[in-house]
Each structure stands twice: as C-alpha cells, then as structure tokens.
Amino acid sequence: MNQLLQSLQEFTVTADYSRSQTTWEVREAGQHAPVILMHKDSPYHSMPEYRVFAAERPDETLGFVTPWVPFSADRRQVGEVRSPEWHRHTGAWTLVQNDLGELTGQPKGLNTRLRRAPVINWYLSRPSVDALLSAQHRFSGPQSEGFDFARRAGIRATYEVTVHDPRVNRLLILAWVLHFNGHHSADVRMTAVDLTTNPFSGLGDARRAKKRRQTGQN
C-alpha cells in the first residue's frame, strides 16, 4: 500500500472536467498544489476507470478507482460502495473494506438532514441544494473509527475528508467521493461538459480497460 497515499489525514478533493479528460486533484489541507491525482483520458460520464498516481510521479500507479469499486495497483479489489444499503429515512450509506469490514455513513448537522427533506427536494433543483447546503457524514464501523466526509456548499463540488483510522484505505474513500459526486451531487461545470460531449466517446476506452483487467496489465 503506497505510503504517500495512506499518509493523507486531512485533504480536499476537486475535479477538473473537459470533453477529452477528467482529473481529480487531492490536496493536503491548507496546501495549494495537489499531491495525488485521479485521471482518465475521457469525459466524466464515460465508463473507463480512473488511474490514481502521485502528482510528482505520474508513471507510478497507486491504484484504480470507479464510483463503485477501488482496486490496488496490482488489480486486487480493495472493497466496494454499497449504494443499495442507503436508507432513505436515515440518510446512511455503507462502504466495505475487505480487511476492515463495514463502514456506515451517518449524516451530521442540520444542513445534511435538510438536503433529504421532501420539501427541499420538491421545490429546489439539485444544483440549488448543493449551492445552499453542505453535506457531512461520519463513516465508522464496529472495528474502525473511519473518517469524516463533507461536501462544501457551493456550485463547484469541493470535498473534505478527515481520516480517524489510518487503516482505512484511501482508495476506498476516493471511490466514495466519485460515487457521491455522480449520484448525490451536481457541478455546473460537469453539466456544461456533458452537454457538449459525445455520449459514446468512452466505449472504446472502457473495452480496453476491461481487457487490461482480464490480462492483469496496467
């Protein structure tokens, strides 16, 4: 497991969208330059996975991430995001790390609960909700103190993570960020790129990524 990636305790995650590529930048709290990148040579909603690597060592793969499953650099599955375990009334999600068990995400704070209120969802669009209300969750389990996760209020998605258990695999956290961003959040920049992108542009890359997984190649 990469020491640089696992050393991250407090960090932010933001995305840079374009029609030909998508890059997520991971920064240590209070720092300007990213230390870790997640990248794929295709638009956001295309199928290929993201390759994770250190910003200063782009040729060294640290792992691979999708919105559902993280993989180590040697293609071993680290865990999974179990979105069907989300409970509409409690706002909880479940993440599973193979060597640590389940981590259940519970909402924190009034803003997070308001995001799930029926009256809010009836009268406000998702971008409006994101602009006005932050989202905070604490993921923990019987064997782990887990981590805190938050999306700042604003039209641009910025995620904050504070890790309380160093055993939590950061690739699983990054998979969760991707999942939340794609299923429970909105970003006006992502929407603008989607409107001008060929929806079939990533199919060839997806087939090549699948073939690499089957052959064990990076």
Image (cartoon, rainbow, N blue to C red):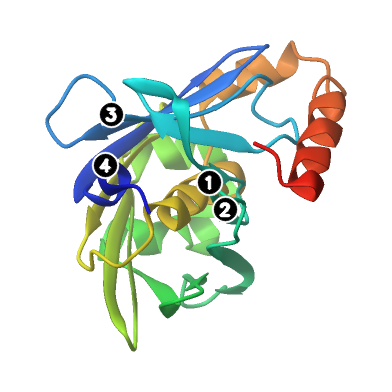
- Name the mark on residue 4: 4
Amino acid type at mark 1 = Ala
Amino acid type at mark 3 = Val
State which mark lies toward you, 3 or 4. Answer: 4
Picture coordinates of residue 96 (x, y %)?
51, 73
Count of number-bearing discs: 4
Tag 4 or tag 1, which sits nearer the N-term? 4
Element carrying mark 3:
loop
Can the viewer see residue 124 in this picture? no
Residue neighbourhood size for the residue with mark 2, other residues' Cα within 10 Å, grouped as few (<14), some (14–19), many (≥20): many
Tag 2 or tag 4, which sits nearer the N-term? 4
Determine the image quadrant of residue 110. bottom left
Picture coordinates of residue 59 (x, y %)?
47, 23
Q: Are marks 1 and 4 in contact (CB under 8 Å)?
A: no
Q: Are marks 2 and 1 in contact (CB under 8 Å)?
A: yes
Quadrant location of the C terminus? top right
Q: Are marks 4 and 2 in contact (CB under 8 Å)?
A: no
Tag 1 or tag 3, which sits nearer the N-term? 3
Q: Are marks 3 and 2 in contact (CB under 8 Å)?
A: no
Amino acid type at mark 4 = Leu
Q: Furthest residue to the bottom?
A: 142
Q: Residue tagged by mark 3?
A: 35
Can the viewer see residue 190 in this picture? yes
Residue at horizontal 59%, vertical 13%?
A: 18
Amino acid type at mark 2 = Phe
Residue at horizontal 27%, vertical 48%?
A: 3
Q: Residue tagged by mark 2?
A: 71
Quadrant location of the N terminus? bottom left
Tag 4 or tag 3, which sits nearer the N-term? 4
Left or right, residue 73 beside residue 138: right
State which mark lies toward you, 3 or 1. Answer: 1
Q: Residue tagged by mark 1?
A: 73
